[in-house]
Image (spheres, rainbow, N blue to C red):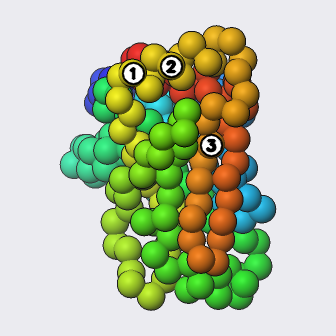
Amino acid sequence: MKKVERSELLNLGEYEQIRQRFLSRIIADKRNRRLAVSDEVTAVFENHDTILFQIQEMLRTERITKENAILHELETYNELIPDAGELSATMFIEIPDAAVRERRLGELAGLESCIALELFGVTIAARNETRGVLPDRTTAVHYLKFALEAKLGARLAAAAKENASGVMFFVLQHPRIRARKEFPAATMSSLVEDLTD
């Protein structure tokens, strides 16, 4: 999938003029890219446009205008874009209560090595791209990549086209949290585009 290029980034003034339209489009696109894995965990599958949006929002929020800082954000976020034959997800542990969240992050230490996709019965372990993982706790945000063999990608495309069910699942296999959430057909269709970009 194509990385975000420097020429695509708008300056702060230009971005403000188109932000509301861009935000509306990204929110609509993310509906089919978001999966509630459990009552505490959500995954959003990233692509070129979701990352372009994240970069523009970071530049806006942090008021970043210096070229070297812009290039740093571009390089950092581009790492989240999937390569050929990959899916990329940002996984969030979403617990509103701060005290409960802190306790759960400790209980879920090692979660990053317990995440997988299951596709046609084949388990595809997540490759953890999260920086700064600690041994005694997990993080609230995880950056994950899943490498799919071409044959599995082709089967997924065919299944998505037929609106098949029971094909693809997001799996958490941690002693303190277990989940196996099926992907809806609309989400599978959106992810097939990632594999063919």
User: How far is disc 1 from disc 2 in space, using C-alphas?
Assistant: 6 Å
For the residue marked with disc 1, what is the amino acid?
Lys
Instruction: Count all numbered tags in the image, as a single digit.
Output: 3
Mark number for residue 120? Answer: none
- Residue at 35% in and 29% down: 149
Mark number for residue 155? Answer: 2
User: How far is disc 3 from disc 2 in space, using C-alphas?
Assistant: 14 Å
Q: Position of residue 49 (x, y in %)?
A: 49, 28
- Residue 149's place in the image compared with 93, above or below, is above
User: How far is disc 1 from disc 3 in space, using C-alphas?
Assistant: 17 Å
Mark number for residue 169? Answer: 3
For the residue marked with disc 2, what is the amino acid?
Arg
For the residue marked with disc 3, what is the amino acid?
Phe
Say which of 87 and 182 sits in front: 182
Where residue 154 sits, quadrant-wise, is top left
Where residue 129 sits, quadrant-wise, is bottom left
Q: Position of residue 25 (x, y in %)?
A: 66, 25
- Residue at 62% in and 43% down: 169
Q: Position of residue 63 (x, y in %)?
A: 45, 52
**Outermost residue toward the left in this view:** 68
Q: Position of residue 30 (x, y in %)?
A: 65, 34
SS category of the residue bearing label 2? helix
